[in-house]
Structures are given as structure tokens and as C-alpha cells.
Amino acid sequence: PHLSWRLAEFFSALEFGFYPVVALPFTPLLAALAWVSVAVGNLIAAVTMGYYLWRVRPGLRHALLEQLMGHEAPETTKPRGE
């Protein structure tokens, strides 16, 4: 399967797995948390981590662009140390 599909599956599993894990031992806490707050917080965290990895790891960026484009991606920046 395509890399972007795997990333979407992983993100969905984390998002939808959070509530059942919290619901078992922390039912009162779950009542206080609105699911929208948790989803927005997780989305902000995921975007922030993705941005960080995009900036810090040029090799990862290149590999991801190759996967998404389906062919060799052009070099956008030189990796650090070259």
C-alpha cells in the first residue's frame, strides 16, 4: 500500500485508540474532556511533529516526495554536511 495511506491509518489508529484507553481507568476524566479538544490537540501535535521532521530530515523529505510522486523526486536541498 501507498505510504500516505499507511500514515493515514496510523494517525487514525492513534486518534481513535486514545479514547478507549483513557475510558477504562479514567472515566471521570473522559467526561471532563471534550472529544473535540482532544482531536484538535492531537492534530496540532501531529502537524507540528510533521513540520519538524520535514525541516530537520531532508532525506526523509526526499523519500516521502518520491513515494507521493511515484518516481524520483528532484533534489530540493542538499543534506546537511555536504
Image (cartoon, rainbow, N blue to C red):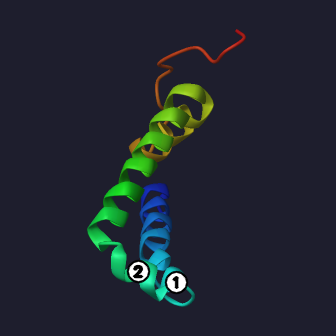
Give me the C-alpha separation between circle 1 and circle 2.
6 Å
* SS for dot 1: loop
Q: Which mark is residue 26?
A: 1
Q: Tell me: residue 79, above or below residue 15.
A: above
Q: How many residues crowd mark 2 within 10 Å: few (<14), some (14–19), many (20+)?
A: some
Front position in the image: 14 or 34? 34
Asked if labels 2 and 1 touch by Cβ distance under 8 angstroms, the answer is yes
Q: Residue at x 56, y 39 (%)?
A: 63
Q: Residue at x 46, y 24 (%)?
A: 74
Number of numbered markers = 2
Residue designated by label 2: 30
Q: Is residue 82 left or right of residue 62?
A: right
User: x%, y% of residue 69?
Assistant: 40, 42
Q: Is residue 37 left or right of residue 71?
A: left
User: x%, y% of residue 7?
Assistant: 48, 59
Residue 56: name its quadrant: top right
Q: Tell me: residue 79, above or below residue 34.
A: above
Q: Could you tell me the amino acid type at mark 2? A: Leu
Q: Which mark is residue 77?
A: none
User: x%, y% of residue 6?
Assistant: 49, 64
Q: Residue at x 43, y 85 (%)?
A: 28
* SS for dot 2: helix
Q: Residue at x 45, y 35 (%)?
A: 51
Q: How many residues crowd mark 1 within 10 Å: few (<14), some (14–19), many (20+)?
A: few
Q: Could you tell me the amino acid type at mark 1? A: Phe
